Amino acid sequence: MNDAEIVTQLSNHRRTIDNLDAALVRILAERFRATTQVGILKATYDLPAKDEGREALQVERLRRHAEEAEMDPDFAEKLLNFIIDEVVQRHKKIASDAKTAA
């Protein structure tokens, strides 16, 4: 393979990566819109921001999906925990804002 072919292949792979990164951002934005609705319901009915039972089920489910996709399930769990931490913080803010507005 010559240098030009290598550059072309790299460019093609990187374009694919860029498209996937953009898709990930859009998917996460949609997920956060959905979890905002959950946060509003939780605040309305004075439910806790964190649901450890639900989180455990999510981790188990995501690890299974990762294994099926031949992805490291530990990485998938770390990523989910990072996302869950952000969601819980948002839920706490929604609840705090709701109390302040009341």
Image: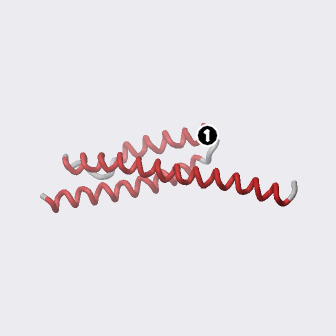
Q: Residue at x 51, y 53 (%)?
A: 79
Pick the front one: 32 or 66? 32
Q: Which residue is rendered at x = 84% and y = 60% of the image? A: 3
Q: Secondary structure at mark 1?
A: loop
| Residue that sits furthest to the bottom in the current view | 100
Q: Which residue is mark 1?
A: 69
- Closer to the camera in the image, 43 or 61: 43
Q: Please state if 24 lies on the left or on the right of 91 as rendered.
A: right
Residue at the farthest right position: 1
Along the line of sight, which residue is nearer the eye, 27 or 41? Answer: 27
Residue farthest left in this picture: 102
In the picture, measured across the screen, residue 60 lies left or right of residue 87, that is right
Q: Residue 56's quadrant in the figure?
A: top left
Q: Residue at point 21% right, 60% down?
A: 97
Rendering coords of residue 93 (x, y %): 28, 60
Task: Identify which residue, 19 or 64, lies in the foreground.
Answer: 19
The amino acid pointed to by label 1 is Ala
Give the quadrant of the C terminus.
bottom left
Whether residue 68 is situated above or below residue 46 in the rendered picture: above
- Residue 46 % position (x, y): 20, 49
Give the percent coordinates (x, y) of residue 42.
25, 48
Image side of residue 3 versus residue 74, left or right: right
